[in-house]
Image (cartoon, rainbow, N blue to C red):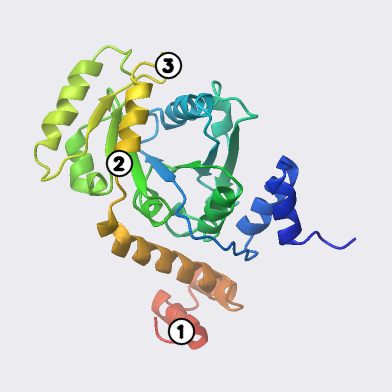
Amino acid sequence: MAMTSLSSQFELAKNGDRRSLARLLTRIENGEEFKVDTQSLPWVLGVTGPPGSGKSSLIDRLASHWSNIGDRVAILAIDPSSPISGGALLGDRARMVHTNPSHVYFRSISTRGNHGGISPGLESMIVTLSELGWNRIIIETVGVGQSEFSVISVVNRVLLVDGPDRGDVLQAEKAGILEIADLIACNKSDLPGSSSSMRSIIDGLSFSENPPPVVSVSSLTGEGIQELAEKIDEVVPNQSKNIARAIITLESTMISRIRKSPVYEDVITKISERKITTLEGVELLEDQYGKL
């Protein structure tokens, strides 16, 4: 039986067929190219922050809030994959308890070892969802390492989530995370110490030249969610991030293509067996792609 074309699946998804939508996104995620003609800029929110800060629960509250006022919300949650097996838990859906599945589309995406945790197909998935009528698209990052920065390659507004006992905001300042954040949510306001944590974050931001707003919220009780949603809507996409966005997108695409090289696996095996050095491996790959 011939495989349904991407265009046919797109049309079926446009008519509300969720199964066709899932299959379409899977094929894009697996590397099939699908271009949608569009002149509009998708509304995309990247949510990042350390593990345990409550990103998934907060996204659940925001998605519920927006869907209740008539918005169509799509959530793409990026899960880390094992560097050995390549598998991922894909368990963020378990924390989504307030959203109505009929109004909110949720999908977990494995990083599959991609550079910065951002799949090369993610941008195409976002455009596809936008053209299918999802007017708010949320990307949840892994929350560690380079993925926190790579998210700006596919979003146009960034929410940093922190909370009590999550460490010093100065660490985020030193790591450069605040440079990409348009807004900070101090989550878990229902816990003891939340007020002092909020003050600590605000005090820490005094070292920044142009600090982002800080909102106190609780994903458990829903306190502050409406204010946070309003602040997010006030964010004006920062065009100065376009250079960083282009760099990350280019590097991610280049690395993805290198991994598809017919000699890539052989080079990796030889390096692991110490038959060649890493530099020699680079030279073998350069024979395929030219000087890197």
Which mark's residue is nearer the viewer, 3 or 1? 3
Element under disc 3: loop
Which is nearer the N-term, disc 3 or disc 2? 3
Q: Which residue is mark 2?
A: 235
Question: Which mark, by number, is residue 96?
Answer: none
Q: Is residue 9 left or right of residue 244?
A: right
* Residue marked by disc 3: 220
Q: Depth check: give the residue in front, 275 or 84.
A: 84
Residue 89 visible at all? no
Q: Nearer the viewer's eye, disc 1 or disc 2? A: 2
Name which residue type carries label 3.
Answer: Leu
Q: Could you say where residue 84 lies in the image, as x and y percent from the top left?
A: 56, 53
> On the image, which quarter does residue 222 sit in?
top left
Q: List the single residue furthest toward the right.
A: 1
Q: Residue at x 45, y 87 (%)?
A: 290
- Relative height, residue 245 to residue 26 (above, below): below
Mark 1 closeness class: few <14, some 14–19, many ≥20 residues within 10 Å: few
In depth, the one of 210 and 272 nearer the eye is 210
Q: How far apart are the two marked residues, 1 and 2, measured between alpha carbons?
A: 42 Å
Whether the residues at callouts 3 and 1 have beta carbons within 8 Å, the answer is no
According to the image, label 1 marks what residue? 286
Which quadrant does the C terminus fall into? bottom left
